[in-house]
Image (cartoon, helix red, strand yellow):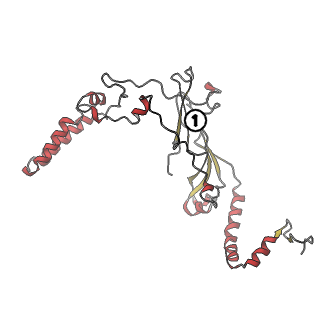
Amino acid sequence: MHKEIHTQHQWRFFAVPVDPMFPLGCKTTFRAYSADQVVEFVKKPKGQCLSKVGRYTGLEPVTLFVRWYPTALCDPNRVGVEGLYILEKLPSCPVGMGTFIEPCDFDVGSSDYIKKCIIEVHRQWQAFDTHATILNDWNVWADTHAPKSDSAVEYVTNSRTRKFYNMPMRIVLFNPTVYMSPDNWLNKLGGYSDYDPNFKWPEAIAIAMNSVASDRFNPHPPEARVYSALDEQIVLKKQNFCDATVLYYDGRLKTATAKLLKEMLRRRVGYSGECRNLLRLDPRS
């Protein structure tokens, strides 16, 4: 999955007692991915990559460890306090809107842009008598549906256009009798090994940091990732050995008989390189 390095894909919101650390009783935490451990691809020069796929593509796979932020040690002004608060005021509701949350205004100049669009439609189609229906449909839309100003509050409080305002999860948020069963969304996906027994985590490792800047809670954020210091020479030698021997062993195993495989399983290679038979005491047998 391609993403910007500072993106946080999973967020949690908790109801907590109201105090100076959480003025409205809502605590928030976040993390880079919705798993404790993921594979992230880092773009690097092919010559600097350690893995085979990295040397082919320039995309180096890295085992990334993910944790929740902010931790109780992230903010020196909130030592011992996990999480932050981003809800600073309760949403206001315009008069006549009941339990609706006030919408954000349209982009500046939206209503003028629509008016210019209608003028252009008339300029293009008014010369064609056969397209009177098209012009009429545009006129009806402009009169009954199009916003007359950039104010979204004005638009949704109008009895004629109010029906077009849809607030996601309104019933869940404002109706205390509605309860969302957690049976489905609390199920946790299994690890990679549950789906692919041959999966191996990349040797290069990193940890996701609390890199989200915030004037109040994180004014001087660290780098988004901290990568471990690997001995690249050792990793390269290991990878080169595997690349050089894999073809031999693949061919050897494909041509081996059951008898030969059983004999190979009985042997162990000691530190000195001598073959030792598990069934005999003589180390040279």
**Nearer to me, 229 or 161:** 161
Q: How far across and how far down the image is residue 41, in percent? A: 56, 53
Find residue 84 and report its image quarter.
top right
Decide: is 223 above or below 27: below
Residue 207 in percent (x, y) is at 63, 44
State the image quarter where residue 171 is shown.
top left
51 vs 274, left or right, is left
Q: How many marks can you see?
A: 1
Task: Using residue 28 as the reference point, say whether residue 229 is left or right of it.
Answer: right
Task: Say few, some or many: other residues with alpha carbon within 10 Å of mark 1 (under 14 / 14 to 19 / 20 or more).
Answer: some
* Circle 1: element type: loop
- Give the residue at x 64% y 30%: 72
Q: Is residue 274 at least partly visible in the picture?
A: no
Is there any visible trace of residue 255 in the rendered image?
A: yes
Q: Residue at x 55, y 61 (%)?
A: 57
Snapshot quadrant of residue 44: bottom right
Name the residue rendered at 11%, 50% in the picture. Answer: 131
Task: Pick the quarter of the image with the C terminus.
Answer: bottom right
Figure check: 270 above or below 89 = below
Please provide percent x and percent y for residue 78. Answer: 61, 25
Q: Position of residue 107 (x, y in %)?
A: 31, 35
Residue situated in front as seen by the camera: 60 or 38: 38
**Residue that numbered label 1 is attached to:** 221
Image side of residue 145 versus residue 51, left or right: left
**Amino acid type, residue under disc 1 in the picture:** Pro
- Which residue is farthest right? 282
